[in-house]
């Protein structure tokens, strides 16, 4: 199960005034405009937010008791995990606070879920109360069965995040990654919390660096097959594949453009690694960089007009940004530490990359415009290959921490980490939607 | 299988293991073994691998066209570096002499890295190492480009699974593989 590495903040320290302001905000249903959470970085690290106090009641059941009990046991931990990872709430749990004396000391919100089971169907009646008045500020009924329960709970979590914090949640997002299987590597796609992994490739080659198109229809990855590197495109729904680019020279680190029409990648067809783009139909191969150095790991800006990449043109790997036509290249990383694997944030302001500091890699966050940066993680293990979630707050990294290795979610604001329950040797994660 | 072929194979395997044993002890001197049995092959025959991975991860031995065994040693590299130091050049000169003499020998040059750093940067660095070796051998006189193929495995094929400099030093290498004819 996912563990929260920081001590949970308790309701006791919540500020009543802040909660009251939130109650007023939440009483008006929100339109779909996600609040920008990115700020330009000064000399210190990013935002610290006051968590919204949220009391998560034990789920209650009605109707077919056996079916309801099963959903209750499975569903509540999923919801608690989602709301905790979101970083927006100070989550506490317990039985319902319907007793007015129990409510007296509480502020913020109470979230109650009642499961009403009929045969295989489960109705989940979700209510959000404001505290301490305990008036209903939002409610909705979800239809589920055991097989889709996790998905429905993720939907509930995203709805709660949207209603109470005005943001688009990440609980329904997916993470793609490369997993070692024997001497091979295959691409997998899992729910963002590490559950429900699906194997997308079964070719027994070395498959790396998955990237999904923004509509979720296409997967592109790098494959070392019979001593030749290829960039392979897969229609995820059918599994049908075609080679977009094949050596001579290696073909690495493909990344879909935001509109899904092009793929940027690195190839050494000219002798050393340069950044290229190719259209999704395999035509229109275009070279963007011209240096004697290694240029790899392109990452598109959300408007598709710029590309960040890693280059060792000054002798050590550093982070650079250029126009998506290859012009106006400038350096982002400032020191001489080895820096690799940039990921451009969905809101366009920040880059995350891995920076070698004192022998291990930290996750560094940099402002694209000013170059100001800070290390999100410092010396607590090694973090590699960061990739942003769509909310611009969370990152997925491959991390080695105190004997634990695997995929971790990082909250770029609070520094909280969550270890995903994916076993095995995992590399090159990317977050999708 | 004839008795003489059997004997030659036993001899070849024994020689390969002996060479591997030397390499494990850290003896970087090159070993040219000269079996006397030439009954199977003539000078025109295509060289065949005798040992490739996995029994001898830091060397590969081929039976050359004239029946002689030749063992390719790994070339080592410094951290985040693809340049060839004096020790690497000593190894490569011997390999160059062999490839110039044994005109039918072909090799795959694998570039490898230690575990530190991102997958993709290491894939590129491993290729740079393999190319560095190939360029040296080309300038040494192995002029037929088609005899040397390069491939990078980045940090995906360590020969020592450790997480310290001893392991990393072994894993930063160019490894020669003799392709099957």
Image (tube, rainbow, N blue to C red):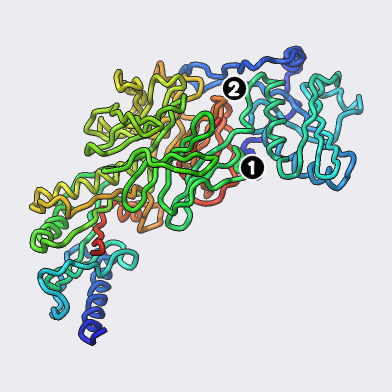
Q: Look at the numbered disc 1 and give the secondary structure of its residue.
A: loop
| Residue in view at x 24 percent, y 58 percent | B176
| Residue in view at x 68 percent, y 22 percent | A162
Q: Nearer the viewer, residue A327 or A424?
A: A327
Residue B55: x %, y % from top left: 33, 68
List the residue tagged with mark 1: A2
On screen, residue A82 above or below A165: below
Residue A62: x %, y % from top left: 89, 39
Q: In the figure, is residue A390 to the left or right of B77?
A: right
Q: Residues within 10 Å of mark 2 (few under 14, many from 20)?
A: few
On screen, residue A214 above or below B72: above
User: Would you identify the image quadrant in which residue A36 lies?
Assistant: top right
Residue A339 is at least partly visible in this image = no
Q: CA distance from mark 1 to mark 2?
A: 22 Å
Q: Residues within 10 Å of mark 1 (few under 14, many from 20)?
A: some
Q: In the figure, is residue A322 to the left or right of A182?
A: left
List the residue tagged with mark 2: A48
| Residue in view at x 33 percent, y 45 percent | A229
């Amino acid at each position: 199960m996912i563990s929260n590495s920081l001590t949970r903040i308790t309701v006791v320290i919540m500020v009543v005034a802040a909660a009251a302001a939130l109650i007023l905000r939440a009483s008006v249903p929100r339109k779909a405009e996600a609040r920008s959470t990115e700020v330009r970085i000064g000399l210190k690290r990013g935002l610290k937010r006051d968590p919204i106090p949220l009391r998560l009641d034990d789920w209650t059941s009605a109707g077919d008791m056996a079916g309801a009990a099963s959903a209750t046991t499975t569903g509540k931990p999923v919801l608690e995990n989602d709301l905790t990872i979101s970083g927006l709430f100070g989550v506490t749990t317990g039985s319902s606070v319907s007793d007015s004396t129990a409510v007296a000391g509480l502020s913020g919100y109470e979230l109650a879920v009642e499961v009403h089971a009929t045969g295989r169907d489960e109705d989940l009646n979700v209510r959000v109360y404001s505290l301490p008045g305990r008036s209903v500020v939002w409610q909705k009924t979800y239809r589920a069965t055991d097989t889709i329960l996790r998905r429905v709970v993720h939907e509930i979590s995203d709805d709660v995040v949207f209603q109470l914090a005005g943001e688009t949640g990440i609980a329904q997002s997916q993470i793609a990654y490369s997993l070692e299987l024997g001497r091979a590597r295959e691409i997998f796609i899992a729910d963002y919390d590490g559950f429900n992994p699906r194997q997308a490739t079964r070719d027994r080659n070395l498959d790396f660096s998955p990237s999904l198109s923004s509509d979720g229809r296409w997967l592109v990855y790098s494959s070392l097959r019979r001593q030749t590197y290829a960039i392979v495109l897969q229609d995820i729904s059918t599994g049908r594949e075609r080679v977009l680019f094949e050596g001579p020279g290696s073909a690495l680190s493909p990344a879909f453009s935001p509109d899904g029409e092009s793929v940027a990648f690195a190839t050494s067809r000219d002798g050393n690694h340069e950044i290229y783009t190719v259209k999704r139909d395999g035509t229109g191969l275009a070279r963007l960089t011209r240096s004697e150095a290694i240029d790899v790991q392109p990452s598109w800006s959300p408007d598709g007009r710029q590309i960040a990449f890693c280059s060792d043109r000054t002798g050590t790997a550093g982070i650079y940004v250029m126009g998506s036509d290859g012009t106006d290249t400038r350096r982002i990383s400032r020191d001489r530490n080895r820096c690799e694997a940039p990921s451009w944030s969905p809101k366009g302001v920040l880059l995350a990359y891995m920076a070698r500091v004192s022998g291990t890699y930290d996750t560094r966050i940099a402002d694209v415009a000013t170059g100001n940066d800070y290390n999100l993680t410092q010396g607590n293990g090694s973090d590699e290959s960061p990739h942003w979630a769509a909310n611009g707050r969370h990152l997925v990294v491959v991390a080695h921490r105190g004997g634990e290795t695997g995929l971790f979610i990082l909250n770029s604001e609070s520094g909280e980490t969550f270890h995903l329950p994916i076993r095995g040797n995992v590399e090159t994660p990317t977050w999708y939607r | 299988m004839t008795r003489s072929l059997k004997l030659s194979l036993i001899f070849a395997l024994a020689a390969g293991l002996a060479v591997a044993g030397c390499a494990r002890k850290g003896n970087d001197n090159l070993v040219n073994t000269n079996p006397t049995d030439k009954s199977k092959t003539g000078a025109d025959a295509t060289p065949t691998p005798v040992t490739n991975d996995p029994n001898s991860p830091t060397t590969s031995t081929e039976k050359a066209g004239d029946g002689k065994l030749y063992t390719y040693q790994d070339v080592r590299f410094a951290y985040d570096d693809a340049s060839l130091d004096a020790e690497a050049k000593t190894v490569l000169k011997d390999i160059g002499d062999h490839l110039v003499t044994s005109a039918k020998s072909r090799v795959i040059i694998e570039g490898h890295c230690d575990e530190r750093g991102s997958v993709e940067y290491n894939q590129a660095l491993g290729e740079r190492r393999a190319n560095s070796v190939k360029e040296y051998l080309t300038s040494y006189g192995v002029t037929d480009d088609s005899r040397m193929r390069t491939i990078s495995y980045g940090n995906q094929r360590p020969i020592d699974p450790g997480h310290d400099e001893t392991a990393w030093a072994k894993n930063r290498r160019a490894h020669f593989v003799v392709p099957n004819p």
